[in-house]
Every structure is written in structure tokens, then in C-alpha cells.
Image (spheres, rainbow, N blue to C red):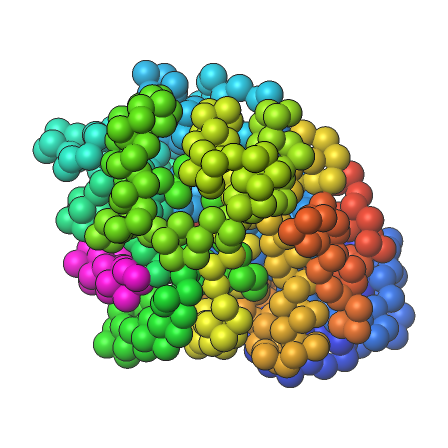
Amino acid sequence: MSFDIVIKNGRIVDGAGNPWYHADIGIRDGRISKIGRFVKAPARKEIDAKDLVVCPGFIDPHSHSELAIFFDNTLQSTIRQGVTTSVLGNCGDNLAPAPPEKMEELSRVLSVFAPPGVKLDSFPWNTFREYLDFMESHGCVANSAHLVGFGTVRLAGGPGFEDRAPTSEELRRMQSLVAEAMEAGAFGMSTGLIYAPQAYAKTDEIIELAKVVAKYGGLYVSHIRGEGANVVNAVKEVIEIVEKSNCIGGHIAHHKISGKPYWGMSRETLRLIEEANRIGVSLTCDQYPYNRGMTSLIAALPPWVHVGGLKNLLDRLQNPEDRERIKRDSDTGIEDWENWIRNDGFESIYIASVKTEKWRSMQGKNLTEITQLKGHRDEWETLFEILTDEKGEAMATMESMNEEDIRRIMRGRYTMVGSDAWAVAPTGVFGYGKPHPRYYGTYPRILGKYVREERVLTLEDAIRRMTSFPAQRMGILDRGLLREGVWADVVVFDPDRVMDRATFLEPHQFPEGILYVLVNGEIVVEENKQTEKLPGKLLRRPW
């Protein structure tokens, strides 16, 4: 028997949680053809994996690389971590549906994620099927699976940024858009319920759309309505949506406990997830291994500021009365609003990326430091000036979590690994700013810090949470395991050296120890260097 590639002498960690064992892997026609001991097996390429771990390619259940694929399909920061499949369309955002009459509004929402100088005036698609067809023909280094985003659907067919329930006609239009996406191959629907306009939706509105997802056997995935004071009720809302819609299951994105006053509440959230599964409601979550989150800086403002969209938000920032109201609301709080400033303080909010030269030197610094450097009256003046100058398109990281909750969630029975990042690169169109180090280091950090150094997880369990578990959850049934007959998405790494190198101040650094990455049987990382191959496939819901 001959092979295209043979990986010899490796420690096989098969992705199912089984103990590692020594074996060789033969790859032919993009799939794993044979696993065993090959004394003499002719192959076009042989990889010696002596003293190295060979495991399935990592499946990231929470990625935001839609625009990255569109502008740079080499996905350098993710493929160099070993991520061979990304689930896109998370937090309620995606690039479709994009009807022409809604493109201007959609482009405002997406512009914060675009590189500086890039205008999103139009896309070469309108429907979700056209979007997937385009991405399929576009080519990519890795595989992708897609969710339909509730926020995008609300913009395309519903009340958009109006703080109200949809009319019956709008609801029917939104349901039709979700159905079209599911028929095109979406794996489910995502929400991002702390973000406008999704924050304006009541539970019943989401349930009605999730019922459509359920008809197609899809998953409900949610950036829940609160991760601090409201986190327990937010988890209960996911359970209610899954129960009442009859979805195949629910999934909580980047589960965390955010805000110092609420640290320790992971005990209760994990208990709720366990209890849901015990009574027959399938519920899982993913997590990134850092104590900071990252999102748009405008998310620090109260929900009412966002009503009507970004233009109205920027107008309100120019109104002295609205500014004073923002300050009061941040001081006293608003029910169900994730109030970062009151919970953690301005000193915990760091500027990650900006689009203008004026604030570029402030990237990596927190709002208190910037206020002192600029000689401003207070942090409010700094915040309002940055948002105004950047037209709302600044990104920030927030230091809001503690290590005890991170470890507790990491060990949870229903927790898998996810990056909550999009692909970037040290140079080129995505080489700007100081993105969260999770963009480069999520998976190596788990393997280096939490497996090898601190033994929070075993090697086999950590890899299961990165491979077969997210594959099973998403319904990607021919990946995530090292088994004969499955697609050859494979990672070869050095267990003694693997580690993230990216930091918050110097994030654009590739990890160490990820030596080979294969996608569909093609080598895309060889001896820690990326090749020029683009063998990724667009995956569609298989049932």
C-alpha cells in the first residue's frame, strides 16, 4: 500500500480522550487511509514525529474570521496554532444575508472589524446561499462552517436598531431568512445579546426564530445576555430558548464570569449546565484561557445610546445632556446591562486597536493611563474623545476575570476550547493594532500553560476539548478524530515546547512548538513555517 504522506513514530492522541499510543498514520487522497505500524510504506512525503504528539486538527467553535477569509485567506494566526476548522457567524454577526437596501447599515456594524482604510460598501452576494457559494469558490487555508447571525437577520428583515418587538410581517421575514440560511447549509443560529440591536430582542422573539433552526436540526449558540450580575439569568434564558424551540441543543459562547463583584459565580452557572443536561436539555460552552475579554469600545455605553444605529450613537456623544446621562447610568447601573465601568473601572479597559493616527500610540494602554498622558480632566473625557475621533470603530480589551473561575470553567464537563478571535498576521492588511493574544495563542496556551505546566487538564482531555468535542457539538462528523476514513486534518506538535508567545503589549507573535499542520491531507504548516497551499473546504450542515 502506498500513501501520499506518512507520519511515522508519533505519539497518537486520537481526540476521543483515549490515552496516547505509538503508531504511524498513512494519508491518501486527503483522508487517513491507515493507522498502524508501517515497516516499509512507500510515500511521496514522510514526516518523522518521534517524541512528538500527533492529534486531530483543532476545531474552533467560536471564530470571527469571516472578513479575514474575505481579505486574507491565509489565516496566519489561526493556522499556526493548529486550527484546521473554524465555526463562523458567532455572536449574532455574519456577512449575510445582505440585501442591497440594508447594506449601508450592515457595513456600519461590520466596519469595526475591518482593517483600517477598508470600506465595506457592498458584497458580491445578497442571500446566505450566495454567501456560502462565494466563500466555497474563494479558497482558504482551513475549513469553515457557518452559523446564521441573529443580529444580521434582525438588520436585514426585522426592526434593526429600533428598540421594539418585530411586527408579524417582520417576524415572518426574519424566519424566512433563517430558513434560507439553514437550507443553504448553516449549522445553526447565533445571538450576541449584549450588543445592539440584539439586546433589544425579548426572549420570545429569539424563540420564534430558534423554532425554525430546530426544524432543520440546528444548534442555538449564544453570547448570553450577561456575563456578570445577570449571568445566572442569562444561562437560564439559553435553557428556556432551547426547551421552548426544541432545538437539538444550546451552546454558550466564551463562558466567563466578568466583573470583580461576581467572581465565583461559575459554581452556579456550571451547576445549571449540568442540571440542564441531566433533565435532557443538551447544553455546552466554550472558553478562551485569558483573564481579559475583547470587543468594540462602544459596548461600554448603555443600551439606549445605541438605538437607531452608529450615526445616532455618535450624535449623542456630541450632546452634553446625553453625556451626563451616560455617566449617571454607568454610576447607578441599568437592569440587565453589562456595566464594565462600574464593575471593573476605567483602569481595566485597554485600547486594543484604532483606525486614526491620533490614538495609535495609545494602543495597549488603559483609559486611566491615557487620561494621565493626555492631561484630560477625567476618563470620561478620554472615552468620549476616542469614540468620537474613531467614529466608534475602536476595539478594547477588558481585564475582568479571575483565574479561579477560568480554571473551574475549563474543567467543566461540558466545556470545550474556543478562541473568540479572527485571523490576523504580523504584516499585511491584518497586521494593525494590538489584538488580544488569544488571536495567536489560545490553543498553544492550553497545551503549554494548563496541560504541561499547571496540569489543570490532561493532554488527552485537553485535545478532546479542542477536537472531537466541538466536532460532535456542531455535527461535523468526519473530522475531529484520528480514525481511518476521516479527513486528514492533523496537527503535529512538541509537547515539551508548545506555548503561546503573544502578549497584550506584543500580540503579533506566533506560538512555539506547532511543527506541522495538515488540512484535508495537504501540509499547510511545515517545520513551523506556513506553506502557500489553500486546501480548506467550506462545510455545510450534513443532515
State whether residue 508 is above or below residue 503. Answer: above
Q: Residue at x 42, y 25 (%)?
A: 108
User: In which quadrant of the rendered view does residue 482 lie?
Assistant: bottom right
Residue ID at (21%, 30%): 162
The span shown in magenta is 229-249
Is 510 on the left-hand or right-hand side of 537? right
Q: Left or right: 350 with respect to 343? A: right
Q: Along the line of sight, which residue is nearer the eye, 270 or 337?
A: 337
Q: Position of residue 303 (x, y in %)?
A: 28, 40
Please say if 361 is above or below 443.
above
The verdict on residue 212 being magenta is: no
Q: Quadrant of residue 110?
A: top left
Would you say residue 239 sits in the magenta stretch?
Answer: yes
Query: Which residue occupies the extreme left position in the image?
Result: 168
Q: Would residue 3 appear left or right of 201 to someone viewing this image?
A: right
**Residue 300 spot, x, y in % from top left:** 39, 43
Secondary structure that dominates the magenta span: helix
Q: Identify the image quadrant of the N terminus.
A: bottom right
Residue 209 point in image, percent of width and height: 22, 44
Where residue 190 sits in the image (x, y, percent)? 36, 47
In which quadrant of the rendered view does residue 498 lie? bottom right
Residue found at x 63% / y 67%:
446
> 278 above or below 374?
below
Residue occupying image coordinates x 47% and y 36%: 377
Number of numbered callouts drawn: 0
**Residue 371, can we see it?**
yes
